[in-house]
Amino acid sequence: MDLDEALELFIVECRELLEDMEAALLAVENATDQGEIINAVFRAAHTIKGSSGLFSLGHIVAFTHVVESVLDRVRSGKLALNGELVALLLACSDHIRALVEGVAGGEQSGTPELAQAGEPLIHQLRVYLDTGAAAANAAATAVVPPAAASSGAPGAAGVRCINGTPVDADHWHISVRFGHDVLRNGMDPMSFIRYLATLGHITAIATVADALPDAAVMDPETCYLGFEIAFKASPDKAPIDKAAIEQVFEFVREDSQLFILPPHSQVSAYVNLLEHQGDSARLGEMLVRCGTLTRQELDAALDQQVETPNALIGTILVTQGSVQAEVVEAALQKQKHAKETVATESRSIRVDADKLDQLINLVGELIIAGANVNMIAHRAKVIELEESTSKLSALVEEVRDSALQLRMVKIGATFNRFQRVVHDVSRELGKDIALVIEGEDTELDKTVVEKIGDPLMHLIRNSMDHGIESAEVRRAQGKSEQGMVRLNAFHDSGSIVITVEDDGGGLNRERILAKAIERGLVEAGHHLTDEEVYGLVLEAGFSTAEKVSNLSGRGVGMDVVKRNIAALRGTVTMSSQEGLGTTVTVRMPLTLAIIDGFLVGVGKAVYAIPLDMIDECVAFSAEPEHDYTNLRGQVLPFIRLRQLFGMPNSCARSENIVVLKHGNQRAGLVVDTLLGEFQTVIKPLGKMFSQVKCVSGSTILGSGDVALILDVPALVQQAMVRAEASVGVANALHGSR
């Protein structure tokens, strides 16, 4: 790893830490036990500060240090974490993110604009620090007395103890052996020591050169040095703990050996050190490195183990009195955890998204080529060739499924982003609104995840602004003053369904209809179902808001939702109960790359239908003037594909009907021939054909011909409309008689 790679890793790590920090701050107010959440926020800020110091990013260190100081006071109980402080810390998190992104953009020292933006935040933070600063300094300078350390009281930082007697050293002892590749990776060992000195005072340092070879064989790019360091915390700075010291050496921990012994060490803290020890070495070596036993004690134990080969090393150490039983148990647990961690890490690998996209494209081309081979084999009528191509097709299908699974990601990360949106918007609106997330483990294609965020943002903001009433109105209606927005995701028939539900006042049907008539969207006297009326809200420029706000009222947003969802081959529907709330349902395909399709023919044209949207196929016969048929006692509206696309009349002896399903709706599609299943590689339509109705894409057949992919939701809707119109005409004719 060179310096550029290390800086890139630092930026990625900071982004992840800031996300964790934001999530923790949003959850802390409603948490029953805030202690661990506050510690998590503190650790995130501390880690960012420490890592920034290694890269000499002084502007990030300076700002984050003030944030860390406030969090330290919160952690110690000197400050209460209320809503105002949470909002301030969230703003600080945003500013740190801006500073980090500035570094990512090449601004290593920050910009005057960013510095100016951070000044008001620093001023607000210092208000919290000025109150009780003397008490905070007194706490920072406090030293745990030996009596307290030896008692095993919580908070004692001790580690080393023989027979229960604490050592007298009042300083931290740090033993570090840098890895051989530290210099090659662009790291300067002295930079870590210099940064350590900014946290406190180095009272003594000794260079360890035992690994230094003869000059004749010495590699000038290899680091052979180590250091023994005596370190004390400064009385005028925040207290130092083991984690803070470990963070100094964060970027060399994997390749180096680092052991930390706190002052006034005691037996009970052996366990604490072993829990934080990141080494997976054998038990005996782990105990030597943490200072639990000497090399001589370990050697004696190993000699005894040779004499009794069936005895465990931990048992021997306890028997001879070298360590206490609880320490050995902690070491065993740590060793087990380290092995499990290594095993877990070995099963996962981070891959660039572009490489995954390239893989999917290659798999798509493989599917097309395989279809061509299958066609040639079928025409040749060679049994051995047909069997080989059949096996090849099965393998290609498995490769396809495995490749698509690599792109499947959980939607929870997208959902959790909206916690911040709800927090900020609710404060802006003066409402108390909670976001409830369900189905966060639901998986879908990363391409869909990337594009669904903006539509969901509009839906949630709209629910908060228009749906949730004010606290006074809710109280008068007997509702809880806190409104609720529920975000849920689940799988249904090969699709991903996302619902945005609120418990607000619901939609006013009559008001929406009146507005639609006023704008000429609906003719007066025309009967519409509830779903059709509520769907008018999704039309461009439609708004029932009485006044324009920063969030809504201009008639834009919901039509953007509909348009963006349609671009993903999805649909949006709305349902509502006045006084109880509104639910917006978004239904989209799981993937936009490769699907199982079913080919149908009309004349010489071939069309593909997503297989998971087909219920069944039956022979079809019906009266020409009807747009619906009787399917086992149920009315099934249908649409003739030939008629829909304006194709010449067929002279085919028989027709077939493909029963389509979309959600809880069913409709039929009348075609000439059924051609069977086909692995469909979805190709987008050009801009010229983007407005063609009932067509969502295209695919390439084995022959090289292009087949259009039918838009099932649009077809179902078209069939329902035609069936209603047909029934209306029939009723009118019947009434005239």
Image (cartoon, rainbow, N blue to C red):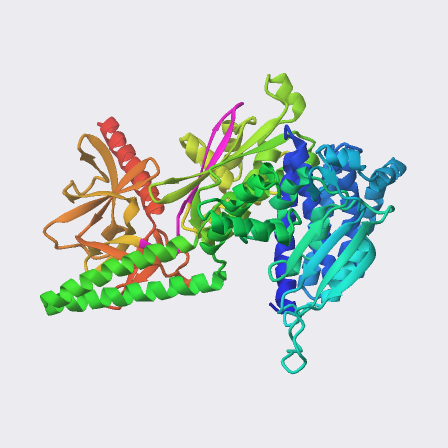
Image quarter hosting the C terminus: top left
State the image quarter where residue 662 is shown.
top left
- Magenta-tinted stretch: 571-595
Query: Which of the two residues, 23 or 349, is positioned nearer the viewer here?
Result: 349
Across and down, in percent, residue 240 comes to 77, 46
Q: Taking 511 as reference, is 423 left or right?
A: right
Residue 323 locus on image (x, y percent): 62, 42
Q: In which quadrant of the rendered image does the N terminus lie?
A: bottom right
Judged by its main secondary structure, the magenta piece is: strand
Q: Let me know if residue 588 is in the magenta part.
A: yes
Residue 579 shown left or right of residue 221 in the figure: left
> In the rendered image, which quarter is residue 257 located in?
bottom right
394 relative position to 1: left or right: left
Give x and y (percent) for residue 512.
52, 32
Which residue is located at x 47 percent, y 44 percent?
A: 311
- Determine the residue located farthest toward the bottom in the rendered image: 216
Q: Nearer the viewer, residue 505 or 307?
A: 307
Work out whether residue 449 or residue 313 is closer to the camera in this orientation and state it: 313
Q: Can I make out residue 725 in this image?
A: no
Residue 122 visible in the snapshot: yes
Nearest the viewer among 197 and 497 is 197
Residue name at image x 58 percent, y 53 percent:
299
Q: Residue at x 31, y 39 (%)?
A: 720
Decide: is 487 above or below 482: below
Q: Position of residue 689 (x, y in %)?
A: 39, 60
Is 544 a magenta residue? Answer: no
